[in-house]
Image (cartoon, grey):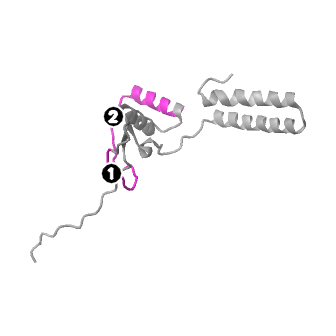
Amino acid sequence: MPIQDHPMPATPEPQSAPLVTDAGIPAEPAGRPILDVRFIMRVSRPLHSAILARARRDGVTAGAWVRHRLLADLGLRSLLDEQSGRPMRRPPEDVVAISSAIRELAAVNAALAMGDGVSARAALDQARAILIPMVVHMPRR
């Protein structure tokens, strides 16, 4: 039986999330938002270490950090491309610090309930001393 030349039914390709220029004009058509293109490149160990350190500081994956930089440099916006692929785990010392700050905030609440403004202020100052440096990426006192 001869092989007949039948066109294959076209399967729609998944669409990426639309990129938007600074002027707000879509750069490509909208569709089901997925990151459908894998972009792989080789980098030196020092560059990898620098990217990883900056990404950790910013609380995103290295891939998300690079995507943010590329989008900014190209003047594009894409909510899908700005997302991080997997959550970054907090270092154990941050978890301990956050737990301490939560206990201090509980002490603020207890002190306020008893009308002890001095103790409430002291506990609030302690919680701030723990949380603010963590949030703005400064060394703790």
Which residue is at 59% across, 38% downward? 90
Q: Which mark is residue 29?
A: 1
Residues at circles 1 and 2 in contact by the CB criterion of under 8 Å: no
Q: Is residue 63 magenta?
A: no
**Quadrant of the frame with the N terminus:** bottom left
Disc 1 marks a residue whose amino acid type is Pro
Disc 2 marks a residue whose amino acid type is Arg
Q: Which residue is mark 2?
A: 42
The vertical placement of 15 against 110, above or below, is: below
Region in magenta: 27-56
Q: Secondary structure at mark 1?
A: loop
User: How many numbered circles are shown?
Assistant: 2
Few, some or many C-alpha atoms within 10 Å of disc 2 (few <14, some 14-19, many ≥20)? Answer: few
Q: Return the x and y of residue 5 as percentages of the image width and height.
A: 12, 69
Q: Quadrant of residue 63?
A: top left
Q: Return the x and y of residue 131 as percentages of the image width and height.
A: 67, 31
